[in-house]
Image (spheres, grey):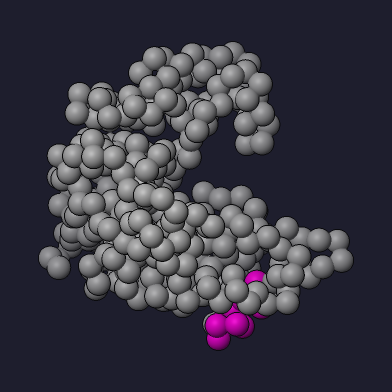
Amino acid sequence: MTAGRQTAGRQTPGPFNVMLIGQAGRLEYEALLFVASLRRADPGFAGRIFVAEPQPGGAWPGDPRMGRATVAALESLGAEVLPFEARHFGAAYPPGNKIEALAALPAGEPFVFFDSDTVITGPLSQVPFDFSRPAASMRRTGTWPEIELYGPGYTEIWKSLYDRFGLDFESTLDLSEPDEYWERYLYFNAGWFFGSDPARFGALFLDYALSVRDDPPPELALQSLDPWLDQVVLPLVIHALGGGRPGPELAGLDGAVSCHYRLLPLAYAREPDPVIEAIEAAAAPNRVKKVLKGHEPMLRMIYNGRGRKLRAEIAEVGLPRSEKALRNWLKRNGYWMR
């Protein structure tokens, strides 16, 4: 590992690995768009880019591998396809891909994981990660737990999880937030996270996830873990490894450096102009375009101009206040695609 360098008074890391998931269907096209955007936004990125691909068998039925054209395009951009076997989650819980794929990364080398539905808009290599203190995305809402009238509250639910694994609960609290308010408790979006060693991180992630899935504490009896399991367990892993909430030095993630857009109709409806420009510029080169046009949402939204039409219409009527309302509007007006 090479030493970091000073940029604007801050230490920036040496080369690190990036991992995302690619598999047959939407994710392979999103992965190609991600890699193309990273190469465009940060041509000096010196780390390795791994597109982790579940293999046939195990917990995935059929063949989940990407198409040959997608693999060729990824490799032409310098990405490495990284096979892994999904033994525990697979089709029953697709977000488990990110948990099981960590074991396939080079052990002992710092890594940053991104969900595939992310676009890179700035120089990722200049983000001053402190890999000894893992963190994850704070672009989240209070999706879990859902507090029931006569059930346990936030403190009881979260504390039961920390107690399960012998972790200190009190030190994770944001005491600037009121008791029993969701933001008081350590909670992340799993759209990006990082650490110093994927083997250690992944082993804890898998151990905690299987324990909570297979034998949840009684305080979770009224709670759904699908699709929230990864986001329920991630704070425990990060805390156990000495990390916590990201500091202001990481504001470029979910900011000027990356955007977790989630689905193209949502991106065109609500993301700022630089994000849309980055998506369209990354999709423009012929070697990328000829693959992405095989995915109907990208064909229609990016190349046929439907995304720009949606964006103009939203500018006229105004953006709905909640994501649920926005999704309903997109469906009513024929823009919903995934």
Pick out the residue farthest to the right. 150
Q: Quadrant of residue 99?
A: bottom left
Q: Is residue 79 above or below residue 316?
A: below
Where is residue 39 shown, x and y percent of the image?
21, 39
Is 84 placed above or below 158 here?
A: above
Let me know if residue 64 appears in the view: yes
Tell me residue 30's x, y (percent). Answer: 36, 39
The boundaries of the magenta stretch are 158-166
| Residue 162 located within the stretch drawn in magenta | yes
Residue at left 38%, top 70%? Answer: 202
Whether the magenta-drawn stretch holds residue 68 is answered as: no
In the shown orientation, is residue 240 left or right of residue 107? right
Q: Main secondary structure of the magenta part?
A: helix
Extreme residue toward the left, this view: 2
Question: Which residue is found at the position 53% from the left and 57% from the top?
Answer: 93
Q: Could you tell me which residue is drawn at 73 percent across and 74 percent down?
A: 219
Determine if residue 267 is in view: no
Q: Is residue 150 above or below residue 321?
A: below
Where, quadrant-wise, is the N terminus in this rendering? bottom left
User: Compared to 94, does 281 lie above or below?
Assistant: above
